[in-house]
């Protein structure tokens, strides 16, 4: 994937007037993919783009879906959240289509990831699409979600899903066990690719949350600059240690914890949903890192979870 081509797409895709669904659909058709088909799917008030292989050997284990949300908040150019990952997947599809025998892979561009905090999670686009997959009896699958992947040199694998299931006392549930096995398998496969640049961190949820609530094993990846990773990890561990030392937390103490937790967020995450999430905030080296990540994940063999 070429950095110049990536930025060329991004310049158009982050423009205020861009109709992001139509623009992406048009680009996919302009690629004239010969080994994949592009399907537009409308469910309720959400629109999705599903790119499926036309042929080739079927996967022996669960099928893989690479997912990125294309929607954005109106107040932001959304360069990192989530234009960068969308264009990275677009260019990755182009490279796969040029292969003689591309691997079996589906790509999904989702809508309505950016729901408001007070909205029901059942309104998230991935929750709606997960329900659609179940209605089509397409349940033997796993999903990899890519969000905020245009800035940084370190691959982050989110621990938010396990944290949510723990809080809901579901550590013995099948979905928790599946995610743990999937995470272990993926980490073992990726470590030699990203020595010292692959970390587990608590991140904001992406639309892996909607799939998770539908019982689909899902992992969320993002990128961060290493300096931000190191600072956030140290501050978070210190904050958790302090809270753990207290036998109980009052409502005021919980509110204070939330404020302090927000204050230690990496600068990259603080750019989300703001006018500063623009092209100047991105780092060109992230494109090559994402190319390596996508290629490595394609090669991961997935036994039944």
Image: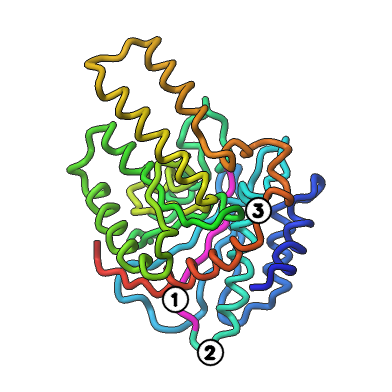
Residue stretch rendered in magenta on the structure: 102-112
* Residue 135 is covered by the magenta coloring: no
Residue at horizontal 35 percent and vertical 35 percent from the top:
237
Q: Which mark, residue 100?
A: 2
Q: Which colouring convention does the figure follow? A: rainbow
Q: Residue furthest left?
A: 172
Q: Real-space Cα distance between discs 2 and 1?
A: 12 Å
Q: Is residue 135 visible?
A: no
Residue under pointer 3: 83
Of label 3 and label 2, which has the lower sequence position? 3
Out of 304 and 179, give the one closest to the viewer.
179
Badge 2: how crowded within 10 Å, few (<14), some, or many (20+)?
few
Q: Considering the numbered disc 2 on the image, is that residue within a helix, a strand or a loop?
A: loop
Q: Say which quadrant the N terminus sits in.
A: bottom right
| Coordinates of residue 260 in the picture (x, y in percent) | 46, 23
Q: Considering the numbered disc 1 on the image, is that residue within a helix, a strand or a loop?
A: loop
Residue under pointer 1: 104
Q: Is residue 120 left or right of residue 189?
A: right
Out of 234 and 142, give the one closest to the viewer.
234
Give the answer, above or below, for where 50 lies relative to 234: below
Q: Is residue 120 left or right of residue 305?
A: right
| Coordinates of residue 165 in the picture (x, y in percent) | 29, 38
């Amino acid at each position: 994937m070429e950095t110049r081509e990536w930025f060329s797409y991004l310049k158009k895709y982050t423009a205020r007037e861009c109709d992001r669904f139509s623009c992406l659909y048009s680009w996919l058709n302009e690629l004239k993919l010969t080994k994949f088909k592009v399907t537009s799917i409308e469910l309720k008030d959400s629109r999705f783009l599903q790119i499926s292989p036309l042929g080739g050997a079927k996967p022996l284990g669960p099928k893989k879906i690479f997912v990125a949300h294309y929607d954005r908040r109106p107040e932001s150019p959304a360069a990192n959240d989530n234009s960068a990952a969308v264009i990275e997947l677009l260019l990755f599809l182009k490279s796969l289509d040029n292969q003689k025998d591309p691997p079996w892979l589906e790509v999904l561009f989702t809508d309505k990831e950016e729901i408001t905090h007070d909205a029901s999670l059942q309104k998230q686009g991935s929750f709606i699409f997960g329900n659609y997959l179940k209605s089509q009896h397409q349940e033997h699958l796993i999903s990899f979600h890519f969000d905020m992947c245009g800035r940084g040199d370190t691959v982050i694998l989110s621990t938010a899903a396990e944290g949510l299931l723990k809080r809901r006392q579901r550590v013995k549930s099948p979905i928790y066990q599946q995610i743990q096995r999937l995470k272990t398998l993926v980490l073992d496969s990726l470590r030699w690719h990203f020595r010292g640049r692959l970390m587990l961190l608590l991140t904001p949820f992406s639309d892996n949350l909607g799939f998770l609530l539908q019982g689909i094993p899902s992992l969320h990846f993002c990128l961060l600059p290493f300096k931000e990773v190191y600072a956030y990890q140290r501050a978070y561990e210190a904050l958790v240690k302090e809270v753990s030392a207290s036998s109980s937390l009052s409502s005021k103490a919980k509110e204070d914890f939330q404020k302090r937790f927000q204050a230690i967020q990496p600068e990259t995450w603080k750019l989300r949903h703001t006018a500063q999430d623009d092209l100047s905030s991105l780092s060109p080296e992230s494109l090559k890192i994402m190319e390596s990540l996508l290629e490595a994940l394609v090669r991961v063999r997935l036994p039944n979870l």
